[in-house]
Image (tube, rainbow, N blue to C red):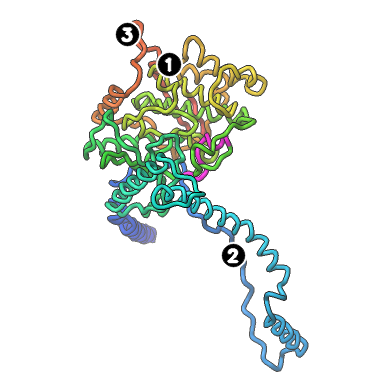
């Protein structure tokens, strides 16, 4: 009897295993395999899910038997007839209060749609006024507007050609000049593979681009971006260099950048209009948390062998669910010049620490850096002011020295905890490391600072990170 039961269990287990194997093979079709080769992967730490209603449906009552004509109440029949006559009357003269309330609720939405339509028509009228006849009362369009519209049409054509070559993306609409670069263009696209929206950027390549646009370089770039998955790094999903331009695809973030959070502005407005001075900066606890998260992201890039990141500013920090994530990594690979004056003039060994100090100041004051305003920030941000003074002092500290400051040591990195995190110690191939070395060697900018004794003070010490269940600790070896 016992042997018979064991045989039955084995037979049932074998059938269940074969059934599961068949279902798994059916789910992984050819589209899934082709998807992995076309893109660098999804964002493991944040995914914008489609808006669906999670409200539970109310349970309907049990089906009731229809009443016959003999069972109906004469009073209820008369009341139903009166309601029917009332509903036939004119709706314009007899509207109930519920309809008026609905119209009051729809009025702001209608006004908002009219305002957006008016802005769109106004922008089109400005662009179209450069060509054709215009009335004497209308102002003549400036040559810069005409040049910008012509360049925008060229960028739109390049973007359309790139999207037509692949069935993965669909163009939604071009966006405004939301960034500080005058030759950069933004487009909203739809990713058909996972049914979500993406942000596509287009920027022309210069003669100082250290990467040759070929298939080998593309495979190395995909390998690099797959390895740069981190909670504080904004992922680049795809990077393509064609027609003398660099097209990058990244997740769509409706909340905007850290600069939008500081100035309380809308992310999709023009760069020249949405950033004005504000009265107060961010809270001190939020400044400390964002600063530690940016510091961890910079250290992760340094451990991976990424060149010194010179494009760190508030506009290149995306905020998602209260987490600051560094973006703009593609600017380093294509050899683009940084927009901040500090990053242009600072040595490569100190550019990341100085850029971090500038972002800390902007988060506290809501304006560009001015060290003469530090005494005014001391009452509300005493520890942050100490770090800013340390960064812009006689000797610029390294990132590892900033990590040991009292302000950053108290921050709980909850995003770094958990058993589902990827392996941060994943090593890059030699070809990918040689590509990063070539990018670092040909990076435009001032020469490196002299290294006394043949060693750099910014060389990171050996660091080991231990992830044990839900605890996160660090060991430093000096």
Q: Of discs 2 and 3, which sits in the foreground?
A: 3
Left or right of 282, for residue 36: left
Label 2 and label 1: CA atoms lie apart by 58 Å
Label 3 and label 1: CA atoms lie apart by 21 Å
The residue beneath circle 3 is 454
- Identify the mark nearer the N-term, 3 or 1: 3
Q: Secondary structure at mark 2?
A: loop
> On screen, 104 above or below 122?
below
- Identify the mark nearer the N-term, 2 or 1: 2
Query: Magenta span has 231?
Result: no
The residue beneath circle 1 is 477
Q: Secondary structure at mark 3?
A: helix
Q: Of discs 2 and 1, which sits in the foreground?
A: 2
Q: Of discs 3 and 1, which sits in the foreground?
A: 3
Q: Secondary structure at mark 1?
A: strand
Counting from the top left corner in percent of width and height, residue 391 is at: 50, 16
Residue 28 is at least partly visible in this image: yes
- Relative to the observer, which residue lies in front, 271 or 214? 271
Counting from the top left corner in percent of width and height, residue 306 is at: 35, 27
> On screen, 413 above or below 8?
above
- Relative to the observer, which residue lies in front, 236 or 263? 263
Residue 57, numbered label? 2
């Amino acid at each position: 009897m016992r042997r018979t039961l064991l045989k039955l269990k084995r037979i049932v287990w074998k059938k269940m295993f074969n059934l599961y194997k068949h279902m798994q093979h059916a789910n992984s079709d050819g589209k899934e395999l082709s998807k992995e080769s076309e893109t660098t992967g999804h964002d493991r730490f944040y995914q914008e899910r489609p808006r669906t209603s999670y409200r539970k449906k109310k349970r309907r009552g049990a089906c009731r038997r229809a009443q016959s004509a003999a069972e109906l109440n004469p009073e209820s029949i008369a009341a139903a007839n009166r309601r029917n006559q009332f509903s036939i009357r004119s709706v314009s003269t007899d509207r109930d209060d519920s309809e008026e309330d609905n119209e009051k609720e729809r009025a702001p939405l209608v006004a908002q749609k009219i305002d957006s339509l008016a802005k769109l028509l106004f922008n089109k009228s400005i662009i179209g006024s450069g060509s054709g006849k215009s009335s004497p009362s209308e102002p003549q369009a400036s040559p810069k507007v005409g040049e910008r519209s012509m360049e925008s049409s060229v960028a739109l054509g390049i973007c359309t050609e790139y999207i037509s070559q692949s069935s993965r993306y669909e163009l939604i609409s071009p966006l405004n000049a939301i960034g500080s670069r005058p030759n950069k263009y933004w487009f909203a696209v739809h990713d058909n593979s996972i049914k979500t929206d993406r942000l596509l950027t287009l920027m022309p390549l210069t003669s100082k681009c250290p990467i040759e646009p070929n298939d080998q370089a593309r495979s190395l770039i995909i390998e690099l971006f797959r390895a740069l998955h981190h909670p504080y790094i904004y992922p680049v999903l795809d990077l393509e260099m064609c027609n003398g331009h660099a097209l990058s695809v990244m997740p769509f973030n409706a909340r905007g950048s850290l600069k939008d959070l500081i100035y309380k502005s809308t992310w999709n407005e023009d760069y020249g209009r949405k950033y004005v001075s504000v009265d107060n900066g961010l809270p001190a606890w939020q400044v400390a948390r964002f600063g530690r998260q940016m510091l961890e992201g910079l250290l992760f890039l340094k451990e991976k062998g990424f060149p010194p990141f010179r494009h760190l500013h508030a506009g290149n920090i995306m905020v998602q669910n209260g987490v600051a994530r560094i973006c703009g990594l593609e600017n380093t690979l294509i050899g683009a010049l940084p927009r901040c004056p500090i990053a242009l003039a600072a040595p490569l060994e100190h550019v990341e620490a100085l850029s971090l100090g500038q972002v800390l100041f902007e988060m506290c004051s809501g304006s560009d850096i001015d060290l003469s305003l530090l005494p005014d920030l001391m009452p509300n941000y005493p520890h942050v002011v100490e770090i800013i003074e340390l960064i812009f002092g006689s000797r610029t500290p390294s990132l590892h020295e900033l990590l040991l400051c009292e302000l950053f040591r108290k921050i709980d990195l909850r995003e770094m905890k958990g058993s589902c995190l990827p392996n941060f110690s994943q090593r890059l191939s030699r070809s990918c490391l040689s590509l990063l070395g070539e990018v670092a060697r040909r990076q435009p900018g001032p020469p490196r600072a002299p290294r006394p004794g043949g060693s750099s003070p910014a060389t990171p010490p050996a660091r080991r990170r231990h992830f044990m269940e839900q605890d996160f600790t660090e060991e430093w070896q000096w």
